């Protein structure tokens, strides 16, 4: 009997902030997918973004970043680590996304989160970030294929919950 695939989703910082702000769609997503056995993982850049917002963010974002960091364990969200080599690969992939104009230069972290999610072998990045949701899916798939990385699909929590129905 073949092993069943791991049920993992990566979350970006925006979804964690949505949870901290008690947005119904975010909590509905979390509850529905965790009930189905999905594990929520956070890339190194996602965790760094929350830490930076917690320290340097303006209000109310600073408050929500603090709250998100405090509730990670309660929400059953677990960070994952990458090796130095994987971190270098992620940075190289991010530069390629910029060259292809798939991610604006000022959204450096978005490209890193996509790459880190791929290197974590997680097929989907759950996000409410328009920069990630508006990426040309075919061009992104081609970029992953050219880099010989597993593809990652950005998806909004509302669309994922709707897909369950």
Image: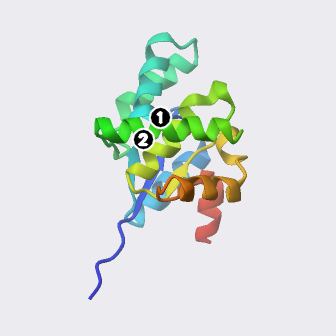
Tell me the residue at 64%/53% (across/down).
140
Callout 1 crowding tier (Cα within 10 Å): few <14, some 14–19, many ≥20? some
Q: Is residue 73 visible?
A: no
Count of numbered tags? 2
| Relative horizontal placement of residue 63, taking residue 159 as reference (left or right) | left
Reply above or below: 65 against 88.
above
Tell me the tag on residue 158: none
For the point 47% across and 26% down, the residue is 49
Observer-nearest of 83 and 164: 83
According to the picture, the residue beneath numbered tag 2 turns out to be 89
Q: Residue at x 61, y 58 (%)?
A: 141
Question: Residue 135: x and y, percent?
Answer: 70, 47
- Residue at 43% from the left image edge and 56% from the top image edge: 122
Tell me residue 62's x, y (percent): 51, 17
Where residue 74 sits, quadrant-wise, is top left
Classify mark 1: helix, strand or loop. Answer: helix
Foreground: 130 or 157? Answer: 130
Observer able to see residue 149? yes
Q: Are marks 2 and 1 in contact (CB under 8 Å)?
A: yes
Instruction: Kindly identify which residue carries mark 1.
Output: 91
Element type where label 2 sits in the image: helix
Point out the image quarter for the C terminus.
bottom right
Towards the viewer: 101 or 13:
101
Q: Is residue 22 left or right of residue 118?
A: right
Which residue is most to the bottom?
1
Q: Nearer the viewer, residue 88 or 63?
A: 88
* 12 lies above or below 121: above
Assess disc 2: are there few (<14), some (14-19) or many (≥20) residues with their C-alpha within 10 Å of its C-alpha: some
Q: Quadrant of the N terminus?
A: bottom left
Q: Is residue 155 above or below residue 48?
A: below
Q: Where does residue 121 sit, x and y in percent of width and height? A: 39, 57
The residues bearing labels 2 and 1 have C-alpha atoms spaced at a distance of 5 Å
């Amino acid at each position: 009997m073949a092993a069943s695939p791991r049920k993992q989703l990566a979350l970006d910082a925006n979804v964690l902030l949505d949870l901290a702000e008690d947005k119904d769609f975010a909590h509905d997503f979390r509850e529905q997918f965790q009930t189905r056995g999905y594990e929520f993982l956070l890339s190194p850049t996602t965790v760094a973004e929350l830490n930076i917002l917690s320290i340097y963010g303006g209000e109310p974002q600073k408050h929500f970043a603090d709250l998100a960091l405090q509730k990670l364990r309660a929400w059953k969200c677990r960070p994952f680590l990458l090796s130095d080599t994987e971190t270098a690969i992620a940075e190289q992939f991010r530069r390629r996304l910029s060259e292809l104009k798939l991610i604006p230069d000022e959204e450096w972290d978005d490209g890193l989160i996509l790459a880190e999610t791929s290197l974590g072998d997680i097929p989907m990045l759950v996000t409410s970030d328009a920069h990630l949701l508006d990426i040309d899916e075919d061009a992104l798939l081609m970029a992953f294929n050219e880099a010989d990385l597993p593809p990652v699909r950005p998806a909004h929590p509302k669309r994922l919950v709707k897909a369950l129905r």
